[in-house]
Every structure is written in C-alpha cells, then in structure tokens.
Image (cartoon, helix red, strand yellow):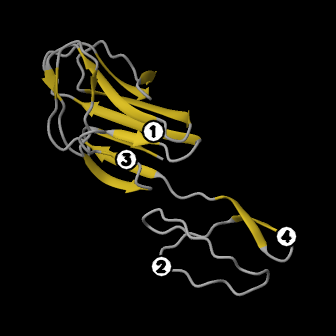
Amino acid sequence: SLDNTGAFTYSEVANNAASPSLPANSVWVAKVVTSGAAITSVLSYTSKTAFSMYRSAAQAFVASTLTKVQFDAIEFDDGNNARVDTTNLGKFIAPRAGNYFVTATVTDTGLAVTRLFTTLFKNGVEIKRGADISASALGSTVSATLKLAANDYIEVYYFVNAAGGTLAGQTLTHFSGY
C-alpha cells in the first residue's frame, strides 16, 4: 500500500488468500509478479501526482528582463512534488519518469505593457514559450505536455517590457499540472 505521506508498504499475500486489511485511503499496488505460489516481486507502482500553486502577493518585475515567477502558496499538492520553500520557490519536481501536463498563467498590472510572454523552464533551460504578445495585455499563459525524467524540475518565467508586477491570487497568477 501507499499511504498519504508517500510511504510504500509491501505485504506478501499467498495466491487465493484473503485480501489484507489496509488503513483508510490506502492505494493498492496493482502490478506484481508471481511464481504461481507466491508474489515474487513488485514491478512498479503509481500514485497520483497533481498540483496547483499560486502567487499570494504581488511580485515586482524589472522591465525587459526574464524573471522567475515566485509562486509562494499551494492550493493542493497530491504527491508532495510542488515546492514553495525559500530555496525552491515555485518549482515542480517530477517524482518519476513520464509525461506531465503543466500550465501557468501570469497576470500583471498592465501599466504601459506592449510586450509580454510566459515561459516554462526545465532544469534551468527554457523549453516552451507561450504566445509572445505584442499589444496591450494583462497577462499570458503557457501550457505543454512534457516528457520528464525523475527529478526533472519545471519553473515558470515571465517577460514584460514595462516595469510593474503580478496581480496575486489563485485566479490570476497560478501554475498547475498533473
């Protein structure tokens, strides 16, 4: 079973034996190898990974500078992979290799803005950029399905051509994925 803290527990069960009792909200391991008489190994297990973080207070941006968005609050984090501590502010860390969908929206104050975009960085390198908007706008979104290795990390950056800042809140400046 996999408990709500991510701890994995393996209990051998003989073929045709009664199912063991599990604590509430446990997750069954579904993929096992048997020798006909016993479980011989666990090949893999999966647990749910989904997160949503947001900016709870305004963040200032320097004009014409690509700046990391410092998401500082978690709405939910199934799998404990979203980071908002001071070292990893606004970072999602893939728990295992696989395909992940992520999306981010940054809403700014809109003061004299004529160019802006939101972009995703993987392990410190830009990999996907949302629309590069060259008109007066109040925000930008980027979404992508990414193939990640275990421990790859994703961060969100924002570019705006005028000094200003983000608007805060779950509905205005957020980063989520699964």
The label number, if any, that marks residue 174 in the structure image: none
Residue most extreme to the bottom: 18
Q: Is residue 77 above or below residue 98?
A: below
Of callouts 1 and 2, which one flags the residue occurring earlier in the amino acid sequence?
2
Q: How far is the residue under mark 2 from the one under mark 3?
A: 24 Å
Q: How far is the residue under mark 4 from the one under mark 2?
A: 30 Å
Q: How far is the residue under mark 3 from the one under mark 1?
A: 12 Å
Q: Which residue is mark 3?
A: 82
Mark 1, secondary structure of its residue: strand
User: Mark 2–mark 3 contact, CB under 8 Å?
Assistant: no
**In the image, which is nearer the foreground, mark 4 or mark 2?**
4
Crowding at dot 2, Cα within 10 Å, few <14 / some 14-19 / many 20+, comes out as: few
Mark 4, secondary structure of its residue: loop
Of callouts 3 and 1, which one flags the residue occurring earlier in the amino acid sequence?
3
Q: Nearer the viewer, residue 136 or 38?
A: 38
Which amino acid lies under the numbered mark 2 shown in the image of this protein?
A: Ala
- Any part of residue 169 in sight: yes
The label number, if any, that marks residue 24 in the structure image: 2
The label number, if any, that marks residue 35 in the structure image: 4
Residue at 20% x, 28% y: name it: 108
Q: Position of residue 26 (x, y in %)?
A: 52, 73
Q: Position of residue 168 (x, y in %)?
A: 18, 40
Residue most extreme to the right: 36
Of callouts 2 and 3, which one flags the residue occurring earlier in the amino acid sequence?
2
Q: Which residue is mark 1?
A: 102
- Left or right of 145 in this view: 78: left
